[in-house]
Amino acid sequence: MTQIPKHLAKVAESDRPPIPRVADERETLLAYLEWHRETLALKCAGLSQEAASARAVPPSTMSLHGLVRHLAGVERWWFRIQFASEDVPLLHYSDDDPDQDFDRLDGDFGEALALWHAECDRSREIVAAASSLDAQGVGKTTGEPFSLRWMLLSMIAEYARHNGHADLLREVTDGATGR
């Protein structure tokens, strides 16, 4: 494990797009979600396949590679499948193997990142096409409606939780903090 000197490992907060302090609700929610997406990208930047796939905090099976796979699947599940009702397969999930996003790290980490970026791009398109934050999707497992507003807040919480995991994984991997 290569240690990065602390003064080089810290990335300034200003390196991410700023979240506007005065904006309407939609702009604020989207800015927070983008900030969290960029945070994950920064935490994954410059890592080798081996470092990204390291399960560095036993007994957890989490790795940065697994987090990227998981969040690509989450983006697809919420935006494409549930909100936009697209008929696309689930990513890194099956009833027989529900934890494959974290457990099966076959495949290239760069390809996993590219897939996550593509899912984020499609999510942005879906949100841009939505008429308002009150637009609704329907939960596939519950049949209950939910608003775009609720889904965006849920996604922000999902990224915030996993970015905490990613921060710890990156620090243990190479000493990088503050990303």
Image (spheres, grey):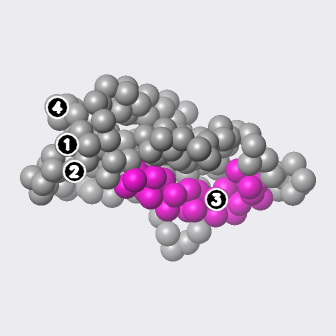
Q: Between residue 127 and residue 119, name the one nearer to us.
A: 127
Q: Position of residue 57 (x, y in %)?
A: 59, 68
Looking at the rendered structure, the kind of residue marked 3 is Asp
Other-residue count near label 4 (Cα within 10 Å), few / some / many at <14 / 14–19 / ≥20: few
Q: Which mark is residue 137?
A: 1
Badge 4 marks a residue whose secondary structure is loop
**What amino acid is labelled 1 in the image?**
Gly
Mark sitting earlier along the chain (4/2): 4
Q: Which residue is located at x 56 percent, y 56 percent? A: 163
The residues bearing labels 2 and 3 have C-alpha atoms spaced at a distance of 30 Å
In magenta segment, residue 131: no
Q: Earlier in the sequence, mark 4 or mark 1?
A: 4
Determine the main secondary structure of the stretch shown in magenta. helix
Q: Are marks 2 and 1 in contact (CB under 8 Å)?
A: yes
Few, some or many residues within 10 Å of mark 1 (<14, 14–19, 20+): many
Span shown in magenta: 153-179
Residue at point 87%, 57% (across, down): 6
Determine which of the numbered discs, if any, sits on residue 87 in the image: 4
Q: Nearer the viewer, mark 3 or mark 1?
A: 1
Comparing 37 with 129, the one in front is 129
